[in-house]
Image (tube, rainbow, N blue to C red):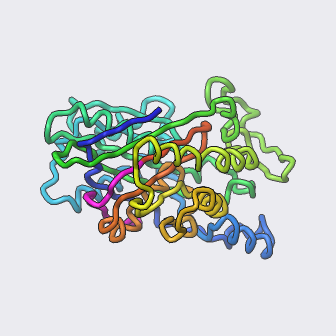
Amino acid sequence: MHQHFENIQLEAIGSVVPNNAVSNDFFSELLSAKELSFFEKTVGIKNRYWADKNVTASDLGVEAFKVLEDNLIGFDKNCVDVIIFLSQTPDYLIPFTSNILQNKLGLRKDILCIDINAGCAGFIQGLSTAYSLASTLKEGKKVLLIIAETLSKIISIKDRTTSMLFGDGASAMLISKTEISNPTDFNFFSDGENFDSIIIPDGGYRNMTCHKSLEEYTTSEGAIKTRMNLEMNGKKVFDFTLREVAPSINQLIDSSSIERESIDNYLFHQSNLFIIKQITNLLEIDKLKVLTNIEEFGNTSGVSIPLLITGNSEKLSLNGKSLMAGYGSGLNWGNCYIDLSLTKIFKTKYV
């Protein structure tokens, strides 16, 4: 699927992460010093931030919205006609979280509330949805997109294959019409045959929660977890990203008539430093154009690209033509070409 937009803009974006930093020292009982060193060198993660036990994704989303409220001069939240909440760690199974946020944020009641359950490709999917809806709104009306994750709540800290990878965070952004011609292109792909490559086996309605769901078991890799924890087939995910992501990026560039030399930055989902380097090599692009922050934040799923944006505000404001790529659970992947030079980008806040 390919989408093209002309007069829609990512108007503003702000991000937050919890104050609670978790360094690799926290996992010293899971890995030896030599293994930790190898993990840092290959995966690239040295730190991540985890929310407190009583803090949910919607709570982080509220804080991200406050960044916009506090920094946008003259912002009137009554201009918001649509709120989209994108997460794989919602507050409840029922009701949907965007509906809760409508009240928490003090938004109007005559508003469209939408939840999207999407993971590492979620920012691309959510932004595309926001652009589509913004194109139907009256002048001056906006779409509020909030992406938030508390992945620390779905992992087992006894699982060395997943516990060290993931961090928490949130981002809020406003999307609206503009009179300025600002071409933005998306493309999307899905491989539902391999849906179980990244999965929480129990807790839905295929495998409903029962007493066995909370019983710990040991995997063949020595990880201790329950069926309510995240499971990931690392080899399948690794092979998928190296096989599919680079060609899909080339396809977007070719189908959109984008001049490769004009792309200032590449913002890839922060999954694994080795994978990011391999995609960079496959695309034969200048590694200095590839932005990373995985060392500090780990893998924050759909929040990872927004954190890249808000962590590089000065660079993107000057040279904003960017190619963004998200890939992960589903298996889903998607890409976006966008000029961020006119976007109001506020620095990441720690809450």
Residue beneath the point at 66% across and 26% down: 208
Magenta stretch: residue 194 in it? no
- Magenta-colored span: 337-351
Q: Is residue 153 above or below residue 199?
A: below
Residue beneath the point at 27% across and 55% down: 12
Q: Residue 292, percent across and down?
A: 52, 66
Q: Say whether residue 109 is left or right of residue 263.
A: left
Which one is in front, 324 or 307? 324
- The quadrant of the rendering that contains the C terminus is bottom left
Which one is in front, 80 or 133? 133
Magenta stretch: residue 350 in it? yes
Q: Say whether residue 62 is left or right of residue 327.
A: left
Q: Is residue 347 above or below residue 230?
A: below
Q: Say whether residue 350 is left or right of residue 36.
A: left
Residue beneath the point at 14% across and 42% down: 140
Q: Residue 102, percent across and down?
A: 29, 38
Q: Residue 95, percent across and down?
A: 43, 30
Quadrant position of residue 64 = bottom left
- Count how many numbered circles sit on residues in the image: 0
Outermost residue to the top: 206
Residue beneath the point at 66% across and 38% down: 200
Outermost residue to the right: 220
Q: Residue 120, percent across and down?
A: 54, 47
